[in-house]
Image (cartoon, helix red, strand yellow):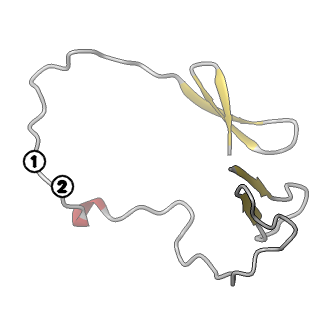
């Protein structure tokens, strides 16, 4: 199986096309699904006041390990936002 997704970064567009190729499938046909608008806010989470845990877990009095992560962000040469986490770059 192969999977690919293409999106134009040069222009603002909401069109995304993706195909999944299976063995012995007709790879010349185009997808025939119907697109719909995503009704969710792209960066939204449920209100934490409405969030209920599946079950309660009491945290330990003292953490077994402390992990510190350096997180920054910058605009890269293409104008895209790049997250920098412990000196490794992650694009958005």
Nearer to me, 1 or 6? 1
Q: Which residue is at the far right?
A: 10
Q: Are marks 2 and 1 in contact (CB under 8 Å)?
A: yes
Q: Residue placed at 17% from the left, 56% from the top?
A: 54
**Lateral position of residue 89 relative to residue 79, left or right:** left
Is residue 57 placed above or below 29 in the rendered structure?
Answer: above
Q: Quadrant of residue 33?
A: bottom right
Residue 82 numbered mark, or none: none
Distance between mark 2 and mark 1 Cα atoms: 6 Å
Q: Quadrant of residue 79?
A: top right
Residue 53 numbered mark, or none: 2
Q: Residue placed at 75% from the left, 53% from the top?
A: 4
Q: Quadrant of residue 30?
A: bottom right
- Please give the residue where the numbered disc 1 appears in the rendered image: 56
- The x and y percentages for residue 36 are 64, 82
SS for dot 2: loop
- The x and y percentages for residue 83 are 64, 35
Is residue 12 placed above or below 10 in the rendered structure?
Answer: below
Is residue 39 placed above or below 43 in the rendered structure?
Answer: below
- The x and y percentages for residue 62 are 14, 19
Q: Residue placed at 68% from the left, 50% from the top?
A: 1
């Amino acid at each position: 199986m192969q999977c690919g997704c293409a999106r134009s970064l040069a222009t603002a567009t909401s069109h995304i096309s993706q195909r999944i190729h299976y063995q012995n499938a007709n790879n010349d046909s185009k997808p025939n699904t119907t697109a719909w608008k995503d009704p969710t806010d792209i960066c939204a989470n449920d209100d934490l006041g409405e969030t209920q845990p599946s079950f309660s877990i009491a945290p330990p009095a003292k953490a077994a390990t402390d992990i510190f992560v350096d997180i920054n962000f910058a605009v890269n040469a293409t104008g895209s936002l790049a997250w920098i986490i412990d000196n490794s770059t992650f694009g958005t």
